[in-house]
Image: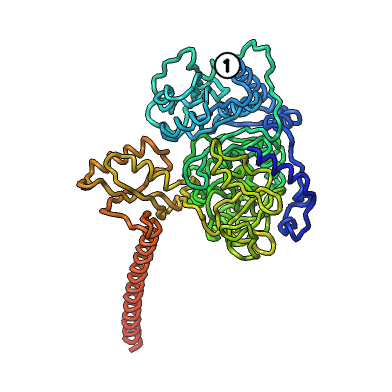
Amino acid sequence: MQKSRLINKELKGKGKKDEMANPWEKFYPEGVTSDLVFPETTMVGYFLDSVSRYPENIAMEFYGSTYTYRELYERIRKAAASLKSLGVKKDDKVAIVMPNTPQALILFYAINMVGAIALIIHPLSAETEIQRFLSESEVKFLLVLDLVYEKIHNIADKTVLETIAIATAGDGLKNIKKFIYKFRKIGQTPKIELTDNIMTWNEFMNYGYGYEGEITCLRRKDDPAVILYSGGTSGDPKGIVLSNYNFNSLALSCHKMIEQSGPEESVLAILPIFHGFGLGVCMHTALGCGMKTILVPQFNPKEFGKLLHKSKASIVAGVPSLFESLTQTKLGKNDLENLKVAISGGDFMSADLKKRVDKYFKDHGSSAEVRIGYGLTEASAAICVTPTGHYKEGSIGIPFPGTRVKIVKFNSHVTADIGEEGELCISGPTVMMGYLNNLEETIQALQQHKDGRVWLHTGDAAYMDKDGFIFFKQRIKRMIVSNGYNLYPSYIETVINSHPKVFTSTVIGIPHPKKVQVAKAFIVLNDGLKPTKEIERSIKEHCEKNLARYSLPAEYEFRDSLPKTLVGKVAYTKLEKDLHEEVQEASSEENKLTKRELKKLKRLEEKAKKIINKISKIGRE
């Protein structure tokens, strides 16, 4: 964790860089340079600056229910008092297992206010994953959505959990009227037996009533604030430790790069709070700038257009498949006239898709054009974006102010030439502090170069042009990106291989029309076993119990053996190559059929012409 402080001190002392070192700087909005001075406060401190400037502005909206900055602050302080009453202290970890709801956001800032660290977990994570995350961080207090509480109930005794607060949809609404919550039910809401240590959200909020001790804990900018789980360099889920400075720097950088980000604007928060992009850009950036964040806990792509129109949001961020679904939505001519900024990240957006989305915006009254972004959780989720009006096909944009990017030759610290492909490395105030309890992976990811800076080695292949635009090529590390989520084959394989009837397995990504890629598992059963529907069903149930829903294999294929490398490892690249060849062959056959149909059509046209000529000749006679 000391590496983050080292980076920040170095950045502060380096001073200005010339244009040759930062060629991208000439594409920044007017008045923006690489040498931004970032907030040296906590995340809640950054938020409080907006409270002081815009107390009566709407800070948050949830299904029509709104909170002003003053009201949101009062609830955050009330939740912080309850945490203190429960004994939560500096550096304790507090877990949030929630979608985008007011309770989740309120508790997030309350955790920061008391000096604790927020561990945010995907509600669809498997029980075994949640148990591991809680145990690694020694979490004692947790907030969970009632619809997924059963998972917590099943693993609580295997952790050091002491207190659980359970939130329901209605807790986030100020209106008394009956409300039908649209969050997709994950099974039926379980019957929950409340005890002294298992309480409702409302009970939790009242727990600190009369607390007279000090609520706010003074923290330094480089103190840890958030733990988010991602894959790390080897593919296994790892806790990524991010500081106050990381998120505040991200928020200010986003604010400067998105020109239309004043207090009169609003952000549609579709990306979830447990995702760095959702938390850092859609929520913390918005609240740090005095904007309104519109929380969307559950999202249906088919309703994206209607949601954009109804919310009147001026800024939206999403994954490419999200924007693709938008182009298939019927809207009125001026239904998107409020939309000013659209940012795509999480996966590569093709030039063709960008053109279609841009045209859709224009046809429906919006001045927005999709701006392509890139980031990873290890760098607080976003590090570069296409500058307004300067799109280059295939590019993921230019670095954010304060962020330095370079391409190094593979497996080295040597800077690659302009246009030469190498590994993308990042240095700057948004780079993580390190991986939780994993020094080996931290040292592998954060490496000090000869320039004295610590650089994050992303594991992504890219090149940079003379203007400083970055062009992403592929992932060096083995990873599948499915609908914006990172899936890690080695982790999925570990789960499948733990099934008693499985000998070995390997997982690769296969094309998907909407999600770009999904996982496919190739499985070899133990000697003497033949694939049956019962065995396949058993393996699927095993995966459903131990993997998050979004990472479940879409296909299972049983084989007698798997291809091996010379050293005996499974040659998953051979499977990928075979799959590619199958796709190419299928495409070739389709083309052959198309050519035959064209020839047949041409013959019919010629025959029709002859008949027409005969008829015309008869008519003349």
Q: Residue at x 65, y 12 (%)?
A: 211
Report the front residue among 289 and 178: 289
The reply, left or right, for residue 23 in relation to residue 538 is right
Location of residue 127 by image quarter: top left
- Where is residue 469? Give x, y as percent: 65, 59
Does 87 sit above or below residue 23? Answer: above
- Where is residue 466? Give x, y as percent: 68, 64
Does 56 sit above or below residue 355? Answer: above
* Dot 1 alpha-carbon crowd within 10 angstroms: few under 14, some 14 to 19, many 20 or more: some
Q: Residue at x 57, y 35 (%)?
A: 227
- Label 1 sits on a secondary structure element that is loop
- Where is residue 408? Give x, y as percent: 62, 58
Does 582 sit above or below residue 437? Answer: below
- Residue 390 in view: yes
Q: Residue at x 61, y 65 (%)?
A: 420
Rendered-image quadrant of the N terminus: top right
Which residue has dot 1 on it?
Answer: 86
The reply, left or right, for residue 242 in relation to residue 621 is right
Applied colour scheme: rainbow
Report the front residue among 298 and 90: 90
- Where is residue 596? Give x, y as percent: 32, 74
Rendered-image quadrant of the C terminus: bottom left
| Residue type indicated by callout 1 | Leu
- Residue 265 in view: no
